[in-house]
Amino acid sequence: MFSRSRNKKSGSTVNSDMLSKQRRYDSLVRALHADIFRYAYWLSGDKHVAEDITQETFLRAWRSLESLKDDKAAKAWLITILRRENARRFERKQFNYSDVEQEHLEDVFSSSSEDKTDQHLIRRQIGKLELEYREPLLLQVIGGFSGEEIATILDLNRNTVMTRLFRARNQLKDVIEQPKARGQSNG
């Protein structure tokens, strides 16, 4: 008899605890679902993904509801779960990679074949510059460094850098203008 009444008592305690947990959870969902969904949508930019993340967030919240000690901290707690769920979404994502070699990809941003020819010519000519001229030019054009910064990087005098930049640009200008001058004299 004693064991039966004890089981009844513990069974009703379990039911009471479950009911209490369910009520707490339901009130949490009612109070914060809209905010959590709104944040999920802001993170994902997709309604369906936001619904999935929100659902997973509340599922995880149900599983670990005992860890929420202060109901006033519930929103921050749920946002933390949501952010982790969003991050997990990217961990699971499998990206499709192509076996196409990069040099075989077409440049769709250039406006014409003439532009492509000019860019190719400039790149080729920069590659032909002596290193002492090519290096400061690339640091300035690609790196965006000032003459003073280039001097520090290359451990040179600023005037030396400025002279090399001037000579590099003049060499490029001469190479680029030569075909145009030849085309005009032939015409």
Image (cartoon, helix red, strand yellow):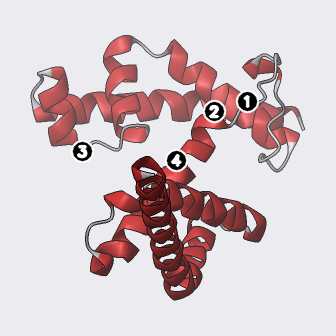
User: Residue at horizontal 55%, vertical 79%?
Assistant: 26
Q: Residues within 10 Å of mark 2 (few under 14, many from 20)?
A: some
Task: Using the image, tell me which numbered label, if any, was put on residue 87.
Answer: 4
Q: Residues within 10 Å of mark 3 (few under 14, many from 20)?
A: some
Confirm or deny contact between disc 4 and disc 3 (CB under 8 A): no
- As helix, strand or loop, the secondary structure at mark 1 comes to helix
**Looking at the image, residue 18 lies above or below residue 150:** below
Q: Residues within 10 Å of mark 1 (few under 14, many from 20)?
A: few
Q: Amino acid at mark 4?
A: Ala
The mark nearer the N terminus, 3 or 1, is 3
Residue beneath disc 3? 146
Quarter the C terminus occupies: top right
Q: Amino acid at mark 3?
A: Ser
| Residue 91 makes an appearance in the image | yes
The Cα atoms of the two marked residues, 3 and 2, are separated by 25 Å
User: Residue at horizontal 62%, vertical 66%?
Assistant: 54
* Between marks 4 and 1 in the image, the one whose residue lies nearer the viewer: 4
Q: Amino acid at mark 2?
A: Ile
User: How far across and how far down the image is residue 130, in percent?
Assistant: 40, 12
User: Residue at horizontal 56%, vertical 43%?
Assistant: 88
Report the side of 100 relative to 15 (left or right).
right
Pick the front one: 22 or 83: 22
**Looking at the image, residue 53 lies above or below residue 21:** above
- As helix, strand or loop, the secondary structure at mark 3 comes to loop
The mark nearer the N terminus, 3 or 2, is 3
Confirm or deny contact between disc 4 and disc 1 (CB under 8 A): no
Residue beneath disc 1? 179
User: Residue at horizontal 40%, vertical 21%?
Assistant: 134
The mark nearer the N terminus, 4 or 1, is 4
The Cα atoms of the two marked residues, 4 and 1, are separated by 55 Å
